[in-house]
Amino acid sequence: MDVPARPELTRRLHARVGPVRCQPGARPNADRSGSRRCAGIRPGVVAAALLGLVTVLTGCVGERATELTGVRSASVDPFSFYTLATSDDLSVTSFTDAQLRGPHYTLGIALVALGQQLDDSVADQLRIDPVQAASGEQLLVAAVDPSVTYAAFDPSPEAAVTAEAVVDGTATALDRLPLRATQYGQPAAKTELILISARPEAQVQLRVTDAGRASTLDLRTGKRLVAAETSSYLQRQSEAQWDGETPVVVNRFGQQVPTSLTVITPLRAVGGPRGASVTTYRPDLGWATAGLGFLSVPAPALVGHDIVSTGLHEEFDDAAVFTFRAPNGEVVPARPRMRDIDLQRSAIGIGGPQPVVVFDVSDDVIAGTVFLDLSRAQLTEETGPGSLQEPSAVRRAISWALPPRVFELQLEFQS
């Protein structure tokens, strides 16, 4: 067995055994090999000293390391894995974009360390047991980035997320991954080290399955692997601020009543991320058709000013009043969804935000305009008993003498 020269071990040897000295009165002699030895020292004593040297050297190199078979993971404090770079036995590669993303998770690898063993000093700093690769294999340690935890949608039992380390086609479940989502800018309380012993030429991958669709990362290169038959999860986001006011005139009780109508953005849309987004998955719709994505836009709040007494309502189908125009001129109507917006109650904050408006668009869209044409909606007024909390279901259709103008929402998407 080759033992590397280490000065500290020489010092320890002298401390335990001491230098080889001649007995009093014995003189150094040269044997036939040309080496010098002390006359009066028996060969058995020299052999015992050499055995002690071998014992000290072999006992100090990885004296607590156990042989790793296959794959295991270990929980460590955030950012403590950077101590891997201090190991003399490991070669470390850092990544800036080694990430997998799904609708319910994002999982990143900060660095990968390769070598033969995770030595005692580094293992102590990580507060895990030292390990070494199996004979003829290589140790790979992948550090999960604790700051990459974003999820577009909250996890649900219907769309479970599972993570696996895959070595030459053999998968091992990683039960503590993905990391739980945290607030923006805050790392997870604990992160994971994935420890793998594999042949140097073995394929070593990280695979995550979300809502039935798998995404794979090559742990040696940090590159995402995309199967030809499936597309990876896509999400682009845009600011989306509805803001506008229009004069209107209502025909009520045989009279024309002038007023105004305002559209504003609610604090948060129900059922989706903040702002507008183009994604290839929605929890309520599943995965989009290949080549398409779901454009989700917060539905605006409609506020009628100076409207009193009996409530006025805008009743409409999204497909009739919302359209999206792409930069190439293509116009797409919204997906059908019936709405009943009470202008009086919305003005005083009753009723809450409406579900988002959804369009089927090309998955490569990066900009466009959403149009809201309320002249295509049906204006109604309550004629039966009701309250601020419960509007009357008894209504009659009325009309605008001066209809609302068309509102526009400009979108620019970024990944």
Image (cartoon, grey):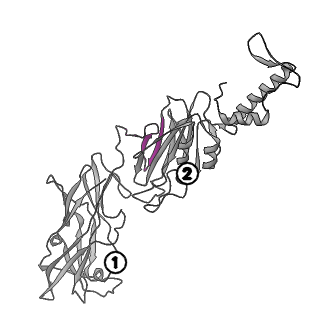
Name the quadrant containing residue 299: bottom left
Q: Upstream in the sequence, badge 2 or badge 1?
A: 2
Most common SS among magenta residues: strand
The kind of residue on which mark 2 rests is Ser
SS label for mark 2: helix
Residue 19 locus on image (x, y percent): 78, 30
Residue corresponding to mark 1 = 351
Asked whether the viewer can see residue 174, the reply is: no
SS label for mark 1: loop
Pick the front one: 169 or 340? 169
Asked whether the viewer can see residue 414, the reply is: yes
Q: Are marks 2 and 1 in contact (CB under 8 Å)?
A: no
What range is drawn magenta here?
204-227
Q: Residues within 10 Å of mark 2 (few under 14, many from 20)?
A: some
Image check: 69 left or right of 330?
right
Residue 264 locus on image (x, y percent): 26, 74
Residue 33 locus on image (x, y percent): 74, 11
Pick the front one: 301 or 321? 301
Number of labels in the image equals: 2
* Residue lying at 57% horizontally and 37% vertically, measured from the top left: 88
Residue corresponding to mark 2 = 80
Tell whether position 209 is magenta: yes
* Residue lying at 23% horizontally and 67% vertically, measured from the top left: 317
Pick the front one: 1 or 246? 1
Residue 52 locus on image (x, y percent): 78, 29
Pick the front one: 224 or 377? 224
Q: Nearer the viewer, mark 2 or mark 1?
A: 2
The kind of residue on which mark 1 rests is Gly
Image check: 356 left or right of 51?
left
Tell whether position 316 is magenta: no
Q: Which mark is residue 103?
A: none
* Residue lying at 32% horizontally and 86% vertically, measured from the top left: 386
